[in-house]
Image (cartoon, rainbow, N blue to C red):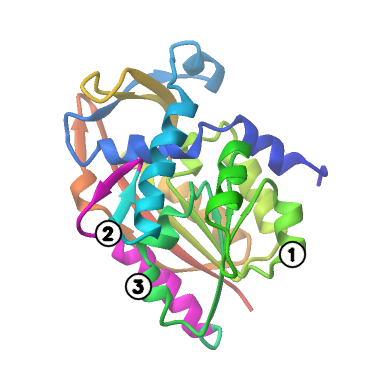
Amino acid sequence: MKKNLISQIIKNWVPPIIAKILKSCFSSKKGSSFTGEYTSWEEALDHCKGYDDADILKNVLASTLKVKLGEAAYERDGIIFNTIEYSWEALAGIMWAASRNNGQLCVLDIGGSLGTTYFQNKKFLDKINKVDWSVIEQKHFVDTGNEEFEDERLHFYHDFKTCMKEQKNDIILLSSVLQYIEKPYILLDNILQYNFEYIVIDKTPFSLDNEDHIKLQVVSPNIYEACYPSWLFSEKSLIEYFTSNSYTLFEKFSDEDSLHANKNDLFEFNGMVWEKNQ
């Protein structure tokens, strides 16, 4: 494996916090949509325009600090909420993994912002004997995370190599990440070399025709004007990939609110919990 291959992939993905904003847009059917059909990632990129990452970081930092200080219950994409919106199935997968490991939880959260999922589930994580939660993100998020939020349980890293040297992670969380990577299976190939015991995939779009598609995910101008390339995955192909790499599907689940009809396209956001074969 090339020394910095995974780091290079992370530098080139759609910024994870933007990925989470795009997923959040689907809570309103008018918030975002998939459009087009592209033969390559480069072709899709030619039709895209982005958003100011610095502004996003500023908003997320302010909101996450309020959660940390107990002034807000929950933060998502820089927006604060009075009540927490859980991804119950993903949380169940994480807690199940902890139960299989004598009440110890060591998570590697790819694209985890400033600890959004950690703070979202902290009420439950606080009941676990030992928690180490590591986030891999882009540089400006990691630098801010280390300055404002790192403690004995929450850590931020620029790359896999450093993280895996310092932490003994046995579960990897891929929440709203894979679809925004040009070559997701290359990332997965390198992840699997670390032999994680458990893999939790959440908030990932799958086509209902069981084919892989490259689309543009377009945000409504009412939110902000932007669009990004996104995969709609073949669930069958992804399952076959993990199965052929010695993982067993423990459970899969769907986000029923995200089922949409977009002209002739049908897709849904699904999740999976995988366990390494012994």
Of the residues under marks 3 and 1, which one precedes in the sequence?
3
SS assignment at label 1 = helix
Q: Nearer the viewer, residue 32 or 273?
A: 32
Is residue 246 among what the camera can see? yes
Q: Is residue 89 magenta?
A: yes
> Under tag 2, what secondary structure?
loop
- Residue 267 visible in image: no
Q: Is residue 142 above or below residue 87?
A: above
Disc 2 residue type? Ala
Q: What is the x, y in percent for residue 187?
A: 63, 44
Residue type beneath disc 1: Glu
Q: Measured from the top left, where is residue 195 in percent x and y?
A: 68, 65
Which of discs 3 and 2 lies nearer the camera? The answer is 2
The magenta segment: 77-100
Vertical relation: 275 (above or below) 33: below
Amino acid of disc 3: Lys
Q: Nearer the viewer, mark 1 or mark 2?
A: 2
Q: Helix, strand or loop at disc 3? A: helix
Please name whichever residue, 130 or 257, is drawn nearer the observer in this view of the structure: 130
In primary-sequence order, the first of circles 1 and 2 is 2
Residue designated by label 2:
73
Q: Mark 3 or mark 2: which comes first in sequence?
A: 2
Label of residue 166 in the image: 1
Residue ID at (64%, 33%): 11
Residue at horizontal 45 percent and vertical 22 percent from the top: 52
Q: Position of residue 124 (x, y in %)?
A: 37, 75
Residue 224 falls left or right of residue 108: left
Quarter location, residue 70: bottom left
- Name the residue carrying label 3: 123
The verdict on residue 80 being magenta is yes
Instruction: Using the image, tell me which numbered label, if any, was put on residue 250.
Output: none
| Viewer-side residue, 179 vs 88 | 88
